[in-house]
Image (cartoon, helix red, strand yellow):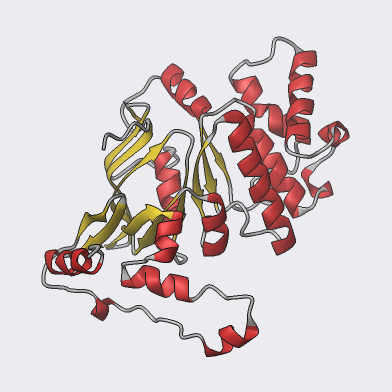
Amino acid sequence: MTDTREKLVEIKNLKQHFKVGRNVVKAVDGLTFDIYRGETIGLVGESGCGKSTTGRTVIRLYDATDGQVLFEGEDVHGKKSVKELKKFNRKMQMIFQDPYASLNPRMTVADIIAEGIDIHELAKNDQERMEKVYELLETVGLNREHANRFPHEFSGGQRQRIGIARALAVDPDFIIADEPISALDVSIQAQVVNLMKKLQREKGLTYLFIAHDLSMVKYISDRIGVMYAGKLVELADSEELYRNPMHPYTKALLSAIPLPDPDTERTRKRLVFDQSQLDDSEEPEFREVTPDHWVSCTTKEFEKLKELNTVK
């Protein structure tokens, strides 16, 4: 069957290594996956696995150590003029994890949101600039009266809405959301995620949604990639991943999600992952076990997975 989906972002053998003293930390170590236009791909894993570093390298906040990131077929990390970088930055935006630290406390909300509008000269005059700011505030569920206030006057959820409005100000095609709900109260998290889903439907946005809350990632994502120690260990449709996890690390992560039934929760067995569960006879490769379900595994593990997942 021919895949008719349009590839917006192609990540090929992406590496991000940092030198720490005499040691090299392989924060991202050979990621390969595509992001299709209009989809949300979730990236999950424990703290320190390289999720946020991946997002920052994709958007070129960090220069890649090796590999390629192609956006609409163009190499993000290739040599670019100031004009080319400006054009690229307009198409790709980021929502940051901490709504308290990511907004300049000395700037009004209007100036924070309009920063991209000013840089890319998207308003003819001050009146048009403010009209765009008011429209963006209303788009994210805030009021135009909020425009002249400062970040400290808002709650965490409201600040994250301001961060979303700032990202939307330049009409991007692709947004990287780096744990956008982790610093928010549980009651506010669903509101922010529902807002992101609504904006995606209305504006045709594509998301890379980075998080460690697996239940929320399932709710927003079309496909989910699981990261462990700088590598992608599994990638599949979100329903398929939850129904049929194949990598031992994914199974351990899913077993840790709390269930709302106290009786089930008391007796449920949680899985613990360690490296000894993996075959170390050869270097694992990212292989397609069933259609669109990719797992990092050795040849021996691949044959076993194929056998287990073959419909008799």
* Quarter of the figure with residue 216: bottom right
What residue is shown at x 44% (from left), y 33% (from top)?
37
Instruction: Give whichever of 164, 236 is nearer the camera.
Output: 236
What residue is shown at x 11% (from left), y 72% (from top)?
281
User: Could you tell me which quadrant the N terminus lies in?
Assistant: top left
* Left or right of residue 252: residue 282: left
Give the vertical position of 3 relative to 126 (above or below): below
User: Could you tell me which quadrant the C terminus lies in?
Assistant: bottom left
Residue 186 visible in the snapshot: yes
Give the vertical position of 176 relative to 29 (above or below): above
What residue is shown at x 16% (from left), y 73% (from top)?
280
Instruction: Give whichever of 138, 48 is nearer the camera.
Output: 138
Single out the residue that lies furthest toward the top: 124
* Left or right of residue 150: residue 1: left
Single out the residue that lies furthest toward the bottom: 267
Number of numbered callouts drawn: 0
Give percent across and percent down for residue 88: 45, 25
* Quarter of the figure with residue 261: bottom right
* Left or right of residue 30: residue 203: right
Instruction: Give whichever of 227, 295 is nearer the camera.
Output: 295
* Quarter of the figure with residue 106: top right
What residue is shown at x 77% (from left), y 44% (from top)?
151
Give percent across and percent down for residue 295: 27, 59
Residue 213 visible in the snapshot: no
Give the vertical position of 104 relative to 266 (above or below): above
Give the vertical position of 170 relative to 304 (above or below): above
Give percent across and percent down for residue 122: 64, 16
Give percent across and percent down for residue 199: 64, 36
Instruction: Give whichever of 99, 310 is nearer the camera.
Output: 310
